[in-house]
Image (cartoon, helix red, strand yellow):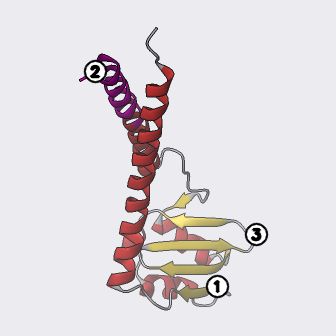
Amino acid sequence: MNELVQQKLVTFLAGFIAGAVVCGIVAAMIASGVFSQDPDPAVSVEEMVAHIKSDQVAEVRLDGDDLRLIYWTGKTARVDDARNASIALIIEAAMGTKTKITESPTTPGILWTLLVSILPLLLAAAVLAGAAALAGYAFGRGFKKS
């Protein structure tokens, strides 16, 4: 193999690996939630019951394992350990108040859940591979034999 071709191949592979590592680190940070924050403060189940009983809560939204409180002031909060809050507990706390309880009407099917779970991963893999290839190409073109 020609020495120039060999040098370009090594440079391309080094750039490809460097780009893949950088993209992998960024993807891992995004997946771990480093860049996202839940804007709603968390309240305990006991605080939720106290807020509902004192008629501070306008609406309780049940969506699977997610439980959100919408206050009369417009602020929202999420219940920290929603699995410990039963619908009976919420209904009992809401008795005699103006609190409205809404529940997610349907849950997605298994096919929809799989598509929603897998498609972003495939898209991320394609983007990472493309970015790594472009980085390798750019590094390869940047180093020229003197």
Measured in 3D between alpha carbons, the distance from the residue under mark 3 to the one under mark 1, in whole angstroms, is: 13 Å
Q: Which residue lies at the image location 58% right of the left edge and 57% below the top edge?
A: 41
Count of labels in the image: 3
Closer to the camera in the image, 108 or 76: 108
Asked if the residue under mark 3 is in contact with the one under mark 2, i.e. CB atoms within 8 Å, the reply is no
Q: Which residues are magenta?
A: 1-19
Q: Amino acid at mark 1?
A: Thr
- In this rendered view, identify the residue nearer to me: 107 or 58: 107
Query: Mark 3 and 1 residues: CB-CB less than 8 Å, in contact?
Result: no
Is residue 132 depicted above or below 57 in this figure?
Answer: above
The correct choice, above or below, for 81 with respect to 140 in the image is below
Q: Which residue is mark 2?
A: 2
Q: Earlier in the sequence, mark 2 or mark 3?
A: 2
Foreground disc of the pair 2, 3 = 2
**Which mark, residue 135?**
none
CA neighbours of label 3 inside 10 A, class few (<14), some (14 to 19), many (20+): few
Instruction: Give the spatial CA distance, label 2 vs label 3.
Output: 73 Å
Q: Name the dominant secondary structure of the magenta segment.
A: helix
* Residue 73, disc: 3
The residue located at (44%, 85%) in the rendering is: 87
Q: What is the secondary structure assignment of the residue under circle 1?
A: loop
| Residue 15 counted in the magenta span | yes
Q: Quadrant of the N terminus?
A: top left
Q: Mark 1 = which residue? A: 99
The residue at the point 56 percent across, 80 percent down is 61
